[in-house]
Image (tube, grey):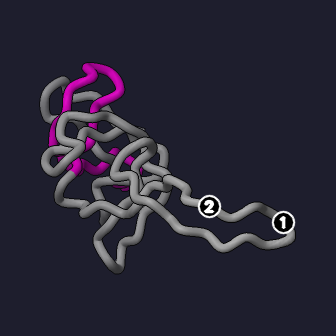
Amino acid sequence: MLNIKKKDKVLVLSGKDKGKKGEIIKVFPDKCKVIVEKVNFVKRHTKSTKKNSGGIYDKEAPIGMSKVMLVCPKCDRASRPKFDKLSDGKKVRVCRRCSEIIV
């Protein structure tokens, strides 16, 4: 089970965008990569078509999952979540710092 999901808020731990916070846009579990909003911009050279004019555009590129850490929505601090089972048997993520369930 992955500890990071789509729409989670994360903190970038290393690289050129170290210290930035952003929301997960897309997760690639087979490649262990994620796309974070407003992080790891690259230049995309696009040929002009009927729909749009060509040019050089900025877009987010995938970043390694090990380079980001989940930010708890309650305490707003980065922490590695632990997994607990509820009484009904459902597996949930729990913040190690404030012991709050992360939805």
- Give the labeled residue for mark 1: 51
* Residue 72 colored in magenta in the image: yes
Residue 20, given in percent of the width and then of the height, sits at 27, 35
Alpha carbons under labels 2 and 1: distance apart: 13 Å
Local crowd at mark 2 within 10 Å, few (<14), some, or many (≥20)? Answer: few
As drawn, 37 above or below 49:
above
Task: Kindly indicate the quadrant of the structure image that contains residue 8.
Answer: top left
* Residue in the image at 32% along x and 77% along y: 31
Q: Nearer the viewer, mark 2 or mark 1?
A: 2
Which of 77 and 14 lies nearest the eye of the viewer?
14
Residue 7, given in percent of the width and then of the height, sits at 48, 44
- Give the labeled residue for mark 2: 55
Image quarter hosting the N terminus:
bottom left
Local crowd at mark 1 within 10 Å, few (<14), some, or many (≥20)? Answer: few
**Which contiguous range is marked in magenta?**
68-91
The amino acid marked with disc number 1 is: Lys
Residue 66, given in percent of the width and then of the height, sits at 17, 59
As drawn, 65 above or below 79:
below
